[in-house]
Each structure stands twice: as structure tokens, then as C-alpha cells.
Image (tube, rainbow, N blue to C red):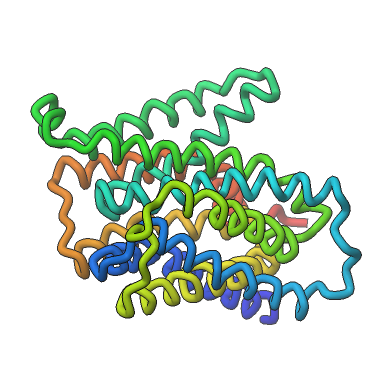
Amino acid sequence: MPNQQTDMSAIVFVTLATIALAFKGVFAKFAYLAGMSVDAVLLMRFGIAAPLFWVGVYFLARKSAPLTRAQWKACSFAGLMFFFATYCDFTAVAKVGVSVSRLILFTFPMMVMLINAVLMRKPPSLHQWCVFFATYFGIAMVMLPDGLASLQGFDWAGASWALGSAFTYAVYLISSQEIMKSLGSVRFTAASGTVTLGIMLLVIPLTAGAEGVSFPTDGILWGVIIATACTVLPFFMLFEGIKRCGATQASLITLSGPIITVLAAWAILGETLNPMQIVGALVTIVAVASLKSAWLVDKLQKVFTKPKAA
């Protein structure tokens, strides 16, 4: 019974984190409608989130040793990659909408697979190649629902921002694996998030005009919601869920994220996908999910395989 209760609490934590993260793009769209730019939203997000993460470090890991120079260096690279990933993501939301940008971003597991294959000098398996082509075939269906006729009206710049976010987020995940083992998730996120904020404070004032970083009252409200409800709280809930049920099981639950985002964008923002795009979205989600199917197959075999008589 205790194990069952623990599993249920883990599912609740991961599910709530997934829902919160899925609404990030929706709330960002509201911030843009309120008059905030991408630059202003990002500055607010990390300006609020970074200090809150260090509050988490104080309560959860304050007895840990200070970060070494090598650890700060690793966190700095991860923070730089997360800056690119986040900037590309929020720009894509502004250009192509919440639904399409989220589905393209969801291809990051394929990016991770290909980058790891290059680093390890080991070609992907036949299954992985099939997943690769199925994933991007599904994305093509979403981007070009009317075939070649869609080429004229589609925002390819926005799609490129989304693909850039998927790639840099994949690099962020790969580069953070080793350093996270020694620092732990809480300290790593606080350190890398601080670096990301520092980069934004340096870069955004140089690239954006004075009007690009204005903070209208309504926009500030959405910025606070994005920073707290869609950044800090989901991280701690996801961290707690992974601790209780493991990263593999948690990752399977997060596969529902794109579906939640598309439904939220339809119900709240009025964004729609035609039947061809819906089929493409399902193809992409199922293809990515199959990368993590080994864990599920093993669990099902244990459930349906009868124990041998003694």
C-alpha cells in the first residue's frame, strides 16, 4: 500500500508539472497581446525565477559545498544553451502560434538521439531512423496541411525559431547530464538559470530598443504567472515526481504536454488545427513516444506474464 500511494503522488506531481509547463505558451501569448515583447517577457521570467530557485537551494541544499570553478563553467555553457532555447521558443510562439511551435519543439528527443549518435560515433538503430522520419513527416503534415499550396502562407521564419529551440534545448539537456549528477537538480537549475538571466541582461538591452522592454501592467501579471506557475513551481513538482517514480516513468507522463498545449490553445486562444494537422500531430507524438516504449513494454510484460509455479 505505501508503494501504491507513493506512485500515485508521483503521478500527481509530474502531471501537475506537465500541465503547468503546457500553459507557458498560452500565457506568453496573453503577455504579447497585453503589449509586452518577447524580450520583456523573458527578462521578467528569469528575473523572478532565478532568485526563487536560490530560495529553493537554501531550503533543499544549503548544506552542500560551494560550486567549483569547473562546475560554474559547465553551468555557464548550459545556461547559454538554455538562453538560446528559451529565446527561440518564445519568439516561435509569437510568430507561428502556440500549437505549431510546441509540436515542433517536441522533436527535441530526436535531436538528442542524433547528437548522441554523432558524439558516440555510433549510427542510430533502424528503429530510431524510423522514428526520425515518422516524426518529421508528422511535423511536415502540421506545417503544410494543404500540401505545396501551404508554402506561400506559412511562416518559415517562425518554424525555424521553433526548430532552433528544439536543437539548443537538446544540446542543453546533453551538456547538463554530467554536471547535474554532481550538483543535483536544484543547485544546477539555480546556477544555470542565473547565468541565463545574466546573458539576457547583457544581450537584450543591446538588441532591443527602448520600446522593446516596456512592462505594461497587464503584461507584468502574465510575466509573474509565467515565472512562478510555469517555471519555478513545475520544476520543483517535476523534481519531486522524478525522485519518487524515476525519470523514465516521469518522461512518459510528460508526453501528454503537447496534447494539453494544443487543447488549451484551441479552447482559450481560438487556435485550430485542421484534420490533416491533427493527424500529423498524432504521428509526431506517437513516434516520439515510441523512443521511450522499452520501459512500457517491460512493465506490460511483467503485468501479463504469469509467475511460474514453484
Residue 139 in view in this figure: yes
State the quadrant of the C terminus: bottom right
* Residue nearest the observer in this picture, 53 or 133: 53
Residue 256 place in picture, x, y as percent: 41, 58
* Residue nearest the observer in this picture, 148 or 137: 148
Residue visible at 49% across and 35% down in the picture: 110
Residue 22 in view in this figure: no
Locate residue 269: give its quadrant. bottom left
Question: In this picture, is 269 found above or below 307?
Answer: below
Locate residue 64: give its quadrant. bottom right
Residue 37 place in picture, x, y as percent: 33, 59
Question: In this picture, is 78 found above or below 232?
Answer: above
Residue visible at 70% across and 66% down in the picture: 243
Is 168 positioned to the left or the right of 194 in the image?
Answer: left
* Residue nearest the observer in this picture, 262 or 218: 218
Residue 221 place in picture, x, y as percent: 37, 79
